[in-house]
Amino acid sequence: MIEELLEVENELFLQTYKRILIDIFHGEGIYLIDKKGDRYMDFFSGLGVNALGYAHPKIIEAVYNQVKKFAHLSNNYITDIQIEFASLLLKYSDMSKIFFTNSGTEAIEGAIKIIRKKYGADKKIFSLTNSFHGRTYGALTLTGNDKYKKGFEPLLPNIFQINFNDINDLITNIDSNTAAIFIEFIQGEGGINIVSQEFVDKLIELRNKFNFVIIADEIQSGIGRTGKPFSFNHFGIKPDLITAAKAIGGGLPLGAILVSDSLANILETGNHGTTFGGNPVSCAAGVAVLREVFENGLMENVKETGNYFLEQLDQIRKEFSEDIKEVRGKGFMIGMELFYEGGEIVNEFFKKKILINCTNQNVLRILPPLITGKKDVDTFIDKFEEILRSR
């Protein structure tokens, strides 16, 4: 029973998570299945990690074949599977070189080190308000929401926030003393907020003038989730550095720092390292993900079905205008801002065996697996209408 598991969990674990009350047995496609056999449509997909859903045969085959050879080697060795994965990710990101990490927050930390090495500690690094970049100290300093920082000060020096989509604030802060700016072009944890084209255009203009680095945080929004390879591809900009994680490992821990030519030689031997970054089994799963997304039509499905999803949700917004303030997003990265806190709606979805979450208090965040089809969207829409009509 889930209640018994929670009692044991309370005794064994630091209490940092709010658990979802499902006694999960296994996953299948877009569904999580509990020990009673109840099926839950997972439109949260492990915080955007499970791009191919659960038990995808290509991932199972890739992991099995690799683990038979070796599950881990230190990074004193180079492996064929690392080469294959790196080549694919560099190809679809249009970057020059890569460093593997275990996670997104470690990719952010490595990116900070690259910037500090290039420009020194005196130049300023910026991020945007309401952003989220991770929980380790550098990533936490970049995160533009004070609720995550409370109790952990002092944080890193010379890192500041610019108001999201505020062009005047951007112009005021960026100058010759700027080293870099970290941007989620679509903010995930912050509530699926989309940067404006005008803000991006001004950012490009300022980079040309002051020669600072633009870092695209694509940890949640990358690997086809928005209907393009990365969210920055929607805005006509090429960043100097990309951080990626979550979906790239197919459910296994994997992250990456991707750099352009201008940053390719900043780190030297011994400057940075990792024990598990680029783990062979994770890379094997990652190859399966990248080929499915970019070569086997999955990104096109995200674009088409995502547009359909957004159209259907906008119709609901018009019908239930007292409940829904705005629908926003791209592809399968969708937010619905409510006029009230969203926890109750999340619970109602749970009762109907659909999993989503609420972020920034009143934004329903929807991150379906990229294999989701229009029939699955229709099921979600029908249940959502039932929830709103019953209020």
Image (cartoon, rainbow, N blue to C red):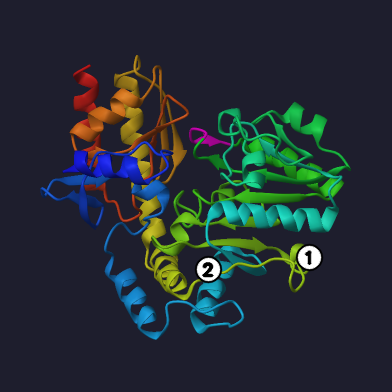
Is any part of residue 148 visible from this angle? yes
Quadrant in the rendering for residue 244: bottom right
| Residue sitting nearer the eye, 348 or 231 | 348
Q: Is residue 229 magenta?
A: no
Q: Position of residue 199 (x, y in %)?
A: 68, 36
- Residue occupying the far front of the picture: 11
Picture quarter with the N terminus: top left
Spatial CA distance of label 1 from label 2 is: 22 Å
Instruction: Select label 1 or label 2 by which is in front.
Output: 2
**Residue 8 in the image: above or below residue 77:** above
Closer to us: 98 or 79:
79
Mark 1: few/some/many CA within 10 Å (<14, 14-19, 20+)? few
Q: Amino acid at mark 2?
A: Phe
Question: Is residue 43 among what the camera can see?
Answer: no
List the residue tagged with mark 1: 266
Dot 1 and dot 2 residues touching (CB under 8 Å): no
Name the chief secondary structure element in magenta.
loop
Q: Which residues are magenta?
A: 190-194
Q: Residues within 10 Å of mark 2 (few under 14, many from 20)?
A: some
Question: What is the residue that sits farthest to the left in this orientation?
Answer: 36
Residue occupied by mark 2: 276
Where does the image place residue 335, in percent across and percent down from the top left?
42, 34
Q: Amino acid at mark 1?
A: Ile
- Image location (x, y in percent) of residue 274: 60, 67
Task: Name, please, the residue furthest toward the right.
Answer: 176
Q: Left or right: 2 with respect to 190? A: left
Q: Is residue 214 left or right of residue 105?
A: right
In the image, residue 382 sits, relative to residue 284, either above or below, namely above
Rendered residue at 75%/33% (across/down): 170
Left or right of 29 on screen, residue 112: right
